[in-house]
Image: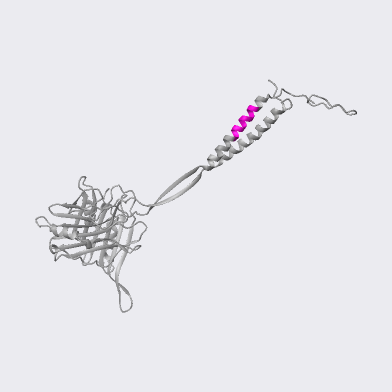
């Protein structure tokens, strides 16, 4: 029975299906739409599984804090000057008889480390300073020397980066500077601040 | 305008295909929408490393990588500030550490005796390229003893004041004086506040 066949029942008004408002969609177009829809569904599914499998690697590099101020005091630490007189150094023979004029020490109270010491000595007209410091996080210090007629400065690196000792001397014009003794003093490993 | 295709006029096979297409379209729309809303999985890892070395002055006041010269004198401004606030002090040390090539002064240090038993040590420093302002500090420490009544008496007091100058620069003055050293407090504050006591970057 085709869809255009009529079924007649006695006593009932004839059933009349509504007439089609337009032509039917050709099957090949239906097939094309179905194929396109299936392709779209497959593409959507593929994209979804790709996005789900996507992994983004984020590597965050955090630096250990190492900043310090000009005095060598690490940022955030409490550094205090020490009131008492510092320990008098054992001086080489070429500087024997020199007296301590003044000194200064800076203590990092947070770590109980001495981070800077300055001692000024005088022997007659010759004065010399011995400075030892450790700056947290600073790079290695290089050996250096500077000499002029009335002044001399030598820097020796310490046991770890950021640490160094400087010995500087000065004398009035015409007075010889004990350069060899100052060099010898600067080379004394005991002058370097402890770890 | 041509009439729209009619469902009832479409062949049954076509209707089945259209129904399948509709289901597939719904699935496509859903999966596309979900895909667009799905964020990639983020794997986060944290690496803790040593910071690059900070730029610093060595013990002689010379920045790393710079050839410095040492002079037994102070920059004029620092000397003037010292003379202004401690006019009767006896000089014991004056030095400058400067760039041998450019003459830029990185450190100036002076030690003077402002009065009997007292010592003042001034250090003005400038780290080239410094961008941060140095912290201000004002600290006092003392060696004390107790008298018979239990009072604390200062034998020696050390005042230390640091005042920031231009970014990367600061002047630090340490005064050691017998007793409380209160006779020097005003001059110490004036010296550290004096802009001439600072080095210029």
Q: Residue furthest bottom?
A: B148
Which residue appears at 43% of the width and 47% of the height?
A: A59
Magenta highlight on residue A149: no
Left or right, residue A31 beside residue B162: right
**Numbered range of the magenta stretch:** A31-41
Q: Quadrant of the N terminus of chain B?
A: top right
Query: Residue B131: percent from the left, percent from the top?
Result: 33, 48
State the predominant SS element of the stretch in magenta: helix
Q: Residue furthest top?
A: B1
Q: Quadrant of residue B9?
A: top right
Query: Residue B169: percent from the left, percent from the top?
Result: 29, 51
Foreground residue among A194 and B13? B13
Q: Residue furthest right?
A: A11
Q: Residue furthest left?
A: A174
Q: Quadrant of residue B172?
A: bottom left
Residue A130 seen: yes
Residue B187 seen: no
Q: Against A34, is B153 above or below?
A: below
Query: Residue A150: percent from the left, percent from the top?
Result: 13, 54
Foreground residue among A100 and A68? A68
Foreground residue among A48 and B116? A48
Left or right, residue B198 beside residue A13: left
Foreground residue among B71 and A29? A29
Colouring chosen for the image of the structure: one colour
Which residue appears at 9% of the width and 56% of the height?
A: A174
Total numbered labels: 0
Query: Residue B4: percent from the left, percent from the top?
Result: 69, 24
Q: Quadrant of residue A137?
A: bottom left
């Amino acid at each position: 029975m085709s869809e255009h066949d009529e079924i007649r029942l006695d006593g009932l008004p004839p059933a009349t299906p509504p007439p089609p408002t337009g032509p039917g969609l050709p099957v090949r177009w239906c097939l094309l739409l179905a194929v396109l829809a299936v392709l779209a569904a497959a593409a959507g599914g593929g994209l979804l599984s790709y996005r789900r499998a996507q992994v983004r690697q984020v590597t965050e590099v955090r630096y250990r804090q190492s900043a310090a101020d000009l005095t060598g005091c690490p940022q955030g630490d409490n550094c205090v000057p020490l009131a008492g007189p510092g320990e008098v150094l054992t001086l080489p023979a070429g500087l024997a008889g020199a007296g301590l004029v003044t000194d200064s020490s800076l203590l990092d109270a947070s770590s109980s480390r001495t981070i800077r010491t300055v001692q000024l000595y005088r022997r007659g007209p010759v004065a010399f300073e011995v400075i030892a410091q450790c700056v947290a996080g600073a790079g290695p210090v290089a050996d250096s020397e500077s000499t002029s007629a009335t002044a001399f400065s030598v820097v020796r690196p310490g046991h770890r980066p950021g640490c160094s000792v400087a010995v500087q001397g000065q004398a009035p014009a015409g007075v010889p500077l004990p350069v060899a003794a100052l060099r010898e003093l600067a080379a004394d490993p005991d002058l370097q601040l402890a770890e | 305008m041509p009439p729209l295709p009619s469902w009832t006029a479409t062949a049954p096979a076509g209707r089945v295909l259209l129904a399948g297409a509709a289901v597939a379209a719904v699935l496509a729309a859903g999966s596309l929408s979900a895909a667009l809303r799905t964020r990639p999985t983020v794997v986060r890892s944290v690496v803790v490393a040593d910071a690059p070395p900070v730029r610093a002055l060595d013990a002689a006041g010379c920045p790393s990588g710079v050839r410095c010269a040492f002079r037994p004198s102070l920059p004029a401004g620092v000397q003037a500030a010292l003379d202004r606030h401690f006019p009767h002090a006896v000089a014991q040390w004056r030095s400058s550490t400067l760039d041998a090539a450019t003459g830029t002064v990185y450190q100036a240090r002076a030690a003077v005796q402002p009065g009997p038993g007292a010592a003042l040590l001034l250090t003005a420093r400038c780290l080239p390229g410094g961008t941060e302002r140095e912290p201000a500090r004002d600290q006092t420490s003392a060696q004390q003893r107790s008298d018979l009544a239990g009072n604390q008496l200062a034998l020696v007091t050390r005042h230390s004041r640091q005042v920031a100058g231009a970014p990367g620069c600061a002047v630090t003055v340490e005064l050691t004086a017998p007793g409380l050293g209160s006779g020097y407090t005003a001059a110490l504050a004036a010296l550290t506040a004096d802009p001439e006591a600072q080095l210029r970057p």
